[in-house]
Image (cartoon, rainbow, N blue to C red):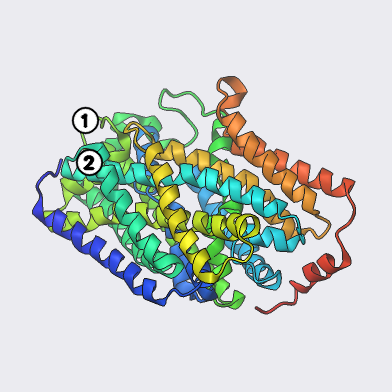
Amino acid sequence: MLEGNLAILVAFILYLGVMLGIGIYYYKKTTDISDYVLGGRGLGSWVTALSAQASDMSGWLLMGLPGAAYLTGLGSVWIALGLGIGTFLNWQFVATRLRKYTEVAGNSLTLSSYFGNRFRDKNNILRIVSSIIIVFYFSIYTASGFVAGGKLFSTVFGLDYTFALTIGAIVIVSYTFLGGFMAVSTTDFIQGIIMFIAVVTVPVIAIVTNGGPTATLDTISGFNTELLNPLTNLDGSKMGLLAILSSFAWCFGYFGQPHILVRFMAIKSSSQIKKSKRIAMTWVTVSLIAAIVVGMVGRVVIPEMLGDSEEVFMVLIDTLLPSIIAGLFLAAVLAAIMSTADSQLLVTASAFSEDLYKPLINKKATQKQLLMVSRFTVLAIAIIAYIIALNPDSSVLDIVANAWAGFGSAFGPVVLFSLFWKRMTRMSAAAGMIVGGVTVFIWGNLSGGIFELYEMVPAFLLACIVIVVVSLMGKEPSKEIQDEFDSILTSKV
């Protein structure tokens, strides 16, 4: 589509050069595993907020969600509503408690180590189970970022998909490998700003070009009036309750996403979370609305239906903007992709080195050895994700939906109960993880009838039930654990 456009190529090279420069800068400052996986708990409010949301939204904000809106119109609003509410609930109820608890419970550096320390798991069952889930689902999740990167380079420069995929993967892996958490958080902060500007500006230009909001709505209605009705399908039939519930259920996934939760753990102080929440909610609310508008105005600007609806944002940029501006805005798509893939690689690396390698393989591992293991785990997971992403027909939204459900159901209930119920036991945590993660895998491979319900719903519910039942069947946690739980209410860290 934009093959041979020098201005766009220059914009991409400059952008990628800055990202790699940040990785090299923090490479020199990263001296131990704490720096590499959690940045020494030194994030400020703005970096915490924007890096959390940029790593959350990923390439699907500028590709998957606009693509869904392009096809279904306001029917896609239920996903956005679920994500917006989920974001708020996560910041409101989980962020502060998790920040405090992870420091009080043995200064936990990873979500897996928090589970182990929280329940005094001397046998490392929780760390092992959670680490296996992280490696499995993040291999899938990271693949969605690589697919988005492959589509971006392929669409923009007319490259072969496999070659384009390789370029994107190499760049993402390079600065994550080098700089670790601070490099990832800093680049995510920058990427969050770029994403926000792009996703807001493009639909505004499209609406103005089409003669304003009223003219744009009239044009959309002229295609199909059902595009403007969030309660109906395009054929005029009412959207089923299961379909709405499945879309809204994305809300529950937030409580179990390691790459988001780790930002709460890394902020300097829990007192800064209130400010971060305001910043994050503003970013999320505006971005989600804008992403849906992008897809819907795409119907107006692009007269012929696209073969791949997830390219609508990129096609709009090419159609509406001059080359140099287009290059900068297309870099925003790359920013969205990179901001999530880098976080996922880093969390997976930290889970493997801290929660599998150290307790099972080398209990006396030095900080240098753990740092090396983390970096090479980044490479290993990237290779697995790259192989998964080799199919050019892969849907970014479908891949994200599966991994999102996996983490949300395996970890979400465990995180919530561990923070708010001191009667919860170690065995119930392990059972909840296994039931949640396995249910997603099984349910997601079934089809037809009731099984069209998003796997997040049954998996999350079953995990909650299992946690309560197993906890009540077992012995109460020790006084030490319950006293530590109570201390979180007064902790000021």
Residue type at tag 1: Glu
User: Which residue is located at x 64 percent, y 67 percent?
Assistant: 108
The vertical placement of 270 against 324, above or below, is below
Q: Residue 397: horizontal and vertical position, in percent?
A: 42, 39
Residue carrying label 1: 304
> If the image is split into quadrants, where does the C terminus sit?
bottom right
User: Which residue is located at x 35 percent, y 46 percent?
Assistant: 293
> Disc 2 and disc 1: Cα gap in Å?
20 Å
Q: Residue 200: horizontal and vertical position, in percent?
A: 32, 56
Q: Nearer the viewer, residue 134 or 31?
A: 31
Q: Secondary structure at mark 2?
A: helix
- Decide: few, some or many residues near mark 2? Use Cα within 10 Å; few <14, some 14-19, many ≥20: many
Q: Nearer the viewer, residue 470 or 178?
A: 178
Residue carrying label 2: 154
Q: Residue 75: horizontal and vertical position, in percent?
A: 45, 36
- Decide: few, some or many residues near mark 1? Use Cα within 10 Å; few <14, some 14-19, many ≥20: few
The vertical placement of 421 against 382, above or below, is below
Instruction: Return the disc, 2 or 1, that comes first in the chain's sequence.
Output: 2
